[in-house]
Amino acid sequence: MRLLHTMLRVGDMDKSIAFYTEVLGMTLLRRKDYPDGQFTLAFVGYGNEAENSVIELTYNWGVEQYELGTGYGHIALEVADVYKACEDIRSRGGKITREPGPMKHGSSILAFVEDPDGYKIELLSPQRGD
């Protein structure tokens, strides 16, 4: 078994694709409208779906906002330098919700950003076991 994708419901497909591609540097792998079901799917990621886990963005036509609820946590991305990644994300219009720095009860360096729908994305330094 392998993890294929994580699905997020989005309120504005174009805005979400722009965030994940232009701000986080992912590639739009594919996008398709489903008129009979009135939804659009787009898949973004850092590599092809045959070898990498990706994010599925789902836009249900006419739904512009979702309640995130209390069950969703975050998606985590490993970056070489959390401080530099935050600078780059901020310069491209991304919203940093937790500035980079050490984890409260560990030594990992992390930060959080937020996508246009309010989903949290954790940026982590390469892991050393904590």
Image: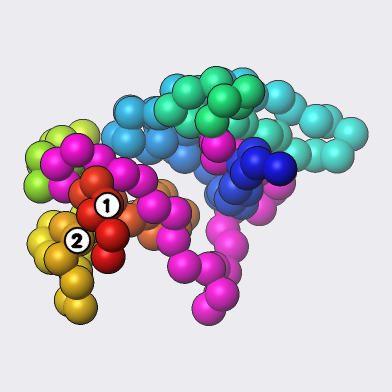
The magenta span reads 53-82
Magenta span has 62?
A: yes
Residue 30, given in percent of the width and then of the height, sits at: 61, 21
Q: Which residue is mark 1?
A: 127
Q: Which residue is mark 2?
A: 108
Q: Is the residue 74 above or below the residue 64 in the image?
A: below
**First of labels 1, 2 by sequence position:** 2
**Given contact means CB atoms under 8 Å apart, are the residues at marks 1 and 2 in contact?**
yes
Residue 48, given in percent of the width and then of the height, sits at: 55, 21
Residue 22, given in percent of the width and then of the height, sits at: 33, 28
* Residue under the image location 19 percent in, 61 percent down: 108
* Residue under the image location 56 percent in, 75 percent down: 71
Residue 50, given in percent of the width and then of the height, sits at: 63, 23
Q: Nearer the viewer, residue 39 or 105?
A: 105
Three-letter amino acid code at the position of disc 2: Ser
Q: Nearer the viewer, residue 98 or 105?
A: 105
Q: Nearer the viewer, residue 112 or 33?
A: 112
> Is disc 1 surrounded by few (<14), some (14 to 19) or many (20+) residues within 10 Å?
few
69 sits left or right of 103 in the view? right
Secondary structure type for disc 2: loop
Q: Nearer the viewer, residue 125 or 37?
A: 125
Three-letter amino acid code at the position of disc 1: Gln
Image quadrant occupied by the N terminus: top right
Q: Is the residue 130 above or below the residue 48 in the image?
A: below
